[in-house]
Image (cartoon, coloured by chain):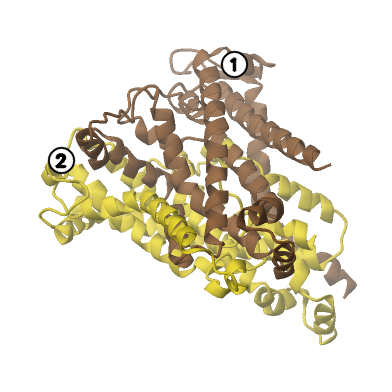
Amino acid sequence: MRGAQRRAPWILLSPFLVLFALTFLLPVVYAVGQSFTAVDRRGLFGEGGITSSFAGFDNYARALDDPTFVASIGRVLLFGVVQVPVMIVLVTVLALLLESASARWPGFFRAAYFLPYGIPGVIASILWSFLYLPGFSPIVAGLGKLGITVDFLGEGTVLWSIANIVTWSYAGYNMLIVIAQLKSIPGEVYEAAKMDGAGPFRLAWSVQLPLIRPALVLATVFSIIGTLQLFAEPQVLRTVSPAIDASYTPNFAAFTSAFTYNDLGVAAAQAVLIAVAAFVLSFVFLRVVSRRDS
Amino acid sequence: MSTAPPDLDRPASGTPEHDRPGVQRGVTRPPAATRILVTAILVLVAVYFLVPVYWVVVAATKSTEDLFTTNGFWFANVQLLENVRSVFAYDGGIFVRWFGNSLLYAGGGALVATYLAAAGGYALAVYDFKGKNTVFGLVLGGVLVPGTATALPLFLMFSRLGLTDTYLSVLLPSFVSPFGFFLCRIYAGSVVPTSLVESARLDGAGELRIFHTFGLRMMAPALVTVFLFQFVGIWNNYFLPLIMLADENLYPITLGLVNWRAQVDRLPEFYELTTGGVLVSIIPLAILMIVLQRFWRGGLTEGSVKG
């Protein structure tokens, strides 16, 4: 009996843990190992034999020496600094409006805003790539008739066209999270606020906002991680925008290093740098937020 | 990307109108001007979210020629059935195959992932054993590892094992949901009573049997959420199959449509195929999202509520 109870948790856990180790832990270890390894191919295609040796920080140095990779980091940072706050503010305003007494048909609007989440990012990118395309897009044509010429795919604009796709895809989902948290605010809190004579703005600012903070913080952290992983949107838009190169985002650069240049050491170093950056940025953000608390 | 995980507290939506704070205690209705203004804003935002979907509905009814020459926001010579037929017929019905592949990856992956996460989460919640906290901490760390950071090394590992370009290369990583594990652990901790497990034991039920008969049933609401998240996550995933698969016959629908999209410059008939294919591909998920809306719930915040 006791033996069965001692074994049971491990029997239940082991299938998950084995697969978790195979698909999460090992790849992380492998990537770190690969990033410190130099592969030497003798002969044009490695027919003279392939040897691996410890490379120290060589791969990292090469990754960071590449101006296009450094530029891609700067690009996603700029993207994140603008897109994430814009989306979070939009999400907060939409959630508060939908949960206010003034909103009509909240169920319909909630579903409409949430719908894009069910469309894969890459399909959303295909859709928007058509809507950005001059000579094809009814939006470009319509604006043209109003005398406004926009180039959604130009050097200076395409990053924000990507930001639009990302916002379109994920705002509704994040809004649902915020609404869930709004609904968890007990009714007494609202009653107390009403007794104190708080109007709708005061209610939103001093009662609802502080209480939905955990949801907003969480949405922000996941958006930061997501921003560093940008790939599908620029990859699809690349077919219509000459402003996008094969290392437009860090993740795109790692993909190109691995599959176009077959430079696995540098690709691994880039992947590790992305993961570390995601971790550091999330951590810093959480620290800043919690410091303000105390 | 940008996907924060779900919470189990309460339905995020589908709540009747009177549950909203203002309405419930709506002795003082907001002034008409405010209501009109708020609704106008909501309508404008809805237009933003719906326009691309509306556009593809219109576009899918058109010939490639009409796509270029007629107003994109209005119908011209409607040939929807013809377009849909050519989507299904192209290249011996490859689209249907991609669709089936997506269903297999997302459905099969999510089903197994949910079961494994349930078993693991239940084990952590119900039993006391050495190493419990280490396991939990390790898996929680997995929630924060960017998916694309593991995809590349995973490809290199799988290619050594000869696993790349197989169904398994996409399915195996899809079987693991650290987030589902986390959610199941929290949920099992709050809904599976120790007394019930004890009395089942006294009745002579084996440990695994207790999990399968009581545990799974009590965790059902959480399992639906975990399944949905994993399903949509896999369905929407692009990077992993892109890296793993070379054989078109194994493609999920995302990869297949990008392939079609990439050919429009050389072969204009692909405009027709791509818009038709995009429309057909988003219908099932759109229905799933709207019908099951109430199962989509909030964030990791659950952890801070129930500890």
Which residue is denoted by mark 2 in the rendering? B68
For label 2, the SS is helix
The residue pinned by badge 1 equals A64
Query: Who's the residue at 50% across and 35% down the image?
Result: A230
The quadrant holding residue A194 is bottom right
Q: Chain of mark 1?
A: A
The residue positioned 78% from the left and 63% from the top of the image is B306
Q: Is residue A185 left or right of residue B234?
A: right
Q: Tell me, by letter, which chain the rendering colours yellow.
A: B
Image label count: 2
- Mark 2 to mark 1: distance in Å? 44 Å
Q: Residue furthest bottom?
A: B203
Please indicate whether residue A114 sits to the left or right of residue B95 in the image.
Answer: right
Q: Nearer the viewer, residue A127 or A172?
A: A172
Mark 1 secondary-structure assignment: helix
Residue B32 appearing in the image: yes
**Where the C terminus of chain A falls, by quadrant?**
top right
Name which residue type carries label 1: Leu
Q: Are marks 2 and 1 in contact (CB under 8 Å)?
A: no
